[in-house]
Amino acid sequence: MIELVKEYSGKGKFFFDIEGETVILDLKFNLIQYSNAEIIVECLLNYISQEFATIINALGQRKNIEVSMDGEIFNPYGIITFDNAFLKTLNMNFKDSLFSNKLIIQPFEPVEILYKDIKSGKIELHAGAINFIYGNCGKEFNGFKIDLNDFIVKFVKNKEYYNIEKALKEEEKKFL
């Protein structure tokens, strides 16, 4: 089952490369990370500019649109960038005299987030290693810690670990 892992909100400068022509839009966005490692960026736009019309026309002509972005996220504050993304979907809505557009962008390379220096406190980062099997550690075993030069990394079992492990073992049999 795919679950939401983390959502970031921010604003940024989006660069839409349409076969060599670059269109730039300043947009607010939500970056959403799922448990299957998929990341999507949703941008809301409630106006049509000449630049946005260029993107709509390119989509209508089935042109390839590559996207990159430089921006910032809030709570916690950080600088965010990505390259090599594509415009996956454009939803246009007109309801109750209000016009809104939702752009869905999917990065194909890692999204880089540089956080402001944190002087103290605890930082928690969640990520998934979907093909990691703990072996014969027993059901009471919930994970382990690694100390990397005073940076503690803790590996814990996902709540769906036993279902995932069973599926991985069944899939392994198919390939052996």
Image (spheres, rainbow, N blue to C red):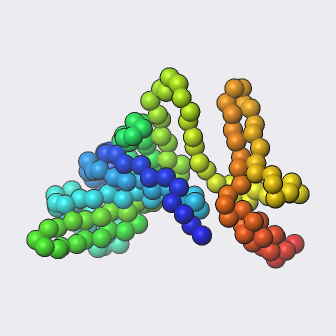
Q: Quadrant of residue 30?
A: bottom left
Nearer-the-camera pick, 95 or 12: 95
Residue furthest bottom as drawn: 174
Residue furthest top as drawn: 119
Badge count: 0
Quadrant in which the C terminus is drawn: bottom right
Quadrant in which the N terminus is drawn: bottom right
Nearer-the-camera pick, 32 or 140: 140
Work out whether residue 108 can be spotted.
no
Residue sitting at x 42%, y 38%: 76
Could you tell whether 151 is left or right of 169 in the image?
Answer: left
Residue sitting at x 21%, y 65%: 100
Could you tell whether 115 is left or right of 103 in the image?
Answer: right
Looking at the picture, does residue 80 appear above or below residue 47? Answer: above
Where does residue 70 sit, x and y in percent of width and height?
A: 37, 42
Where does residue 72 sit, x and y in percent of width and height?
A: 36, 40
Nearer-the-camera pick, 3 or 10: 3
Residue sitting at x 72%, y 31%: 148
Q: Quadrant of residue 37?
A: bottom right
Could you tell whether 138 is left or right of 87 in the image?
Answer: right
Q: Quadrant of residue 49?
A: bottom left
Looking at the picture, does residue 63 appear above or below residue 69? Answer: below
Where does residue 167 sit, x and y in percent of width and height?
A: 75, 72
Nearer-the-camera pick, 109 or 95: 95
Looking at the picture, does residue 118 appear above or below residue 138? Answer: above
Work out whether residue 137 can be spotted.
yes
Residue sitting at x 42%, y 49%: 8
Residue furthest front as drawn: 140
Where does residue 147 sit, x and y in percent of width and height?
A: 74, 32
Could you tell whether 15 is left or right of 76 in the image?
Answer: left
